[in-house]
Image (cartoon, rainbow, N blue to C red):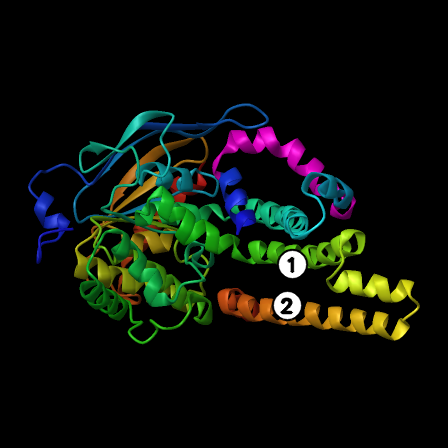
Amino acid sequence: MTTPGMTPREMTEGTGAPVVSLRNVRKVYASATGPRVALADITFDVARGEFACVVGPSGAGKTTLLRCLSGLMPPTSGEAFFEGVPLRSVPAGVGVVFQDYSRSLYPWLTVASNVDLPLRVRGVRRAARANQVAEVLTSVGLADAGRHYPWQLSGGMQQRVAIARALAYRPDLLVMDEPFASVDAQTRFELEDLILRVRDEFGVTVVFVTHDIDEAIYLADRVVVVSKSPGVVTEIVDITLPRPRDQIATKRAEAFSRYREHLLGLVMSR
Amino acid sequence: MAGIGLGALLWSLRYAREATQPYVYFLYVLPAPVLVPAAMTLFGIGFTMKVVLIAFAALWPTMLNTLDGMRGVDQVKLDTARVLGLSRVRRVFSVVLPAAGPQIVAGLRNSLQVAIILMVVSEWESSTDGIGYYIVNAQQSFDYLDMWSGIFVLAIIGMVANLLFVAAENRVLHWHYGARAVEGRP
């Protein structure tokens, strides 16, 4: 794998290439009623260490965008780059958390085995794997859940398992597709703070897709607004709210409301 | 085993699947007992004939269920496997086959029933020993006590086979039943 004590992030640091780079990405699906343009023309970069949120109305092709930028699906035209290299498949340095944890976790494996799986396929030694699994489970607050099966846990805990699995192999980039859309509001706030914390701890670049504007402002360094299908980038908004962020203080700030108003205007107007 | 293997093979080879589909269904709908006479002419009367026939008939339910189960695996589970870096081979063994497990087991259960039916039928038709022969022979010599005993023994054999099967199933699929119980489905 990597040199001990050195994350892939540190080894590639200094190359200066953005972690994610989309250039005129266009995606057209064939459908029974003729071709359907999901993404018309998407161009933006995400710098190393940045937390970028992608917001847009439902049906804006947010999930399509995510599949293109994680290498799960090639764009029809345009190009997606990961650390300066054109994407042909999912690179080893990318982790993805899907919206529906009940579909992405493997129910026939225990929590620990789910988290262990990406380490095993990367050929990490058994002893090192056990340590890494325990470490990452502790980071997401599930130190004691390793022997359970995912379906024995609550929804919020299952999504934590999915986050732990995506972080276990220390990816450079974490891509999240509306990860907190199917948990209750309170759990959602907890998970938002959790993701900010592990992002600092693991030093990972994050692209976070959501339809919730408050969530996007709360989490992001930059918010990319995508229009309704066919998707184009409407605007990219820098969020300069101070960190660390706090569920009460940050959301009460006047700047927060201004961002909120501005972004809502952008999303609703189309 | 051959059923799972063949089902998996057909799943991985799309063209083979489309090409063989009509024949597969043609053979599948054929009631296997009518093949007893054909099997007798091909393999004679005896052990080989029985084994070939049982294997042939028991193949279909498992094969078709395996194929169906593998085709029905959730796209999110496959995407996840790609993201986690699983190779093609590993995706099949670590994700597709376990996910198709419940349906494969349902196929195996059908195969077991078919196998027992064919065991008995093939013995009726063409054997000088075995439980099927015993039952028919007793009936034809008006020995009803023996006939009923034969049927009773057969029921016990079926029951034991089924119990063993269920025990194995609970071991392999305990996660499936656990998850279903949590979701509140029967």
Residue A57, image quadrant: top left
Horizontal side, residue A167 vs residue B30: left or right = left
Q: What element carries label 1?
A: helix
The residue pinned by badge 1 equals B112
Secondary structure, magenta segment, majority class: helix
Check the residue under mark 2 and report the chain it is in: B
Asked whether residue B81 is drawn in magenta, I would say no
Q: What crowding class fits label 1: few (fewer than 14 Cα within 10 Å), some (14-19), or many (20 or more)?
A: many
The span picked out in magenta is B12-34
Q: Inspect this view and state whether residue A251 appears.
A: no
Residue at figure coordinates x 75%, y 53% from the top left: B122
* Residues marked 2 and 1 touching at CB (< 8 Å): yes
Query: Residue B33 in magenta?
Result: yes
Please identify the quarter of the rendering in which residue B28 is found: top right
Q: Name the residue under label 2.
A: B161
Q: In this rendering, would A17 be left or right of A237?
A: left
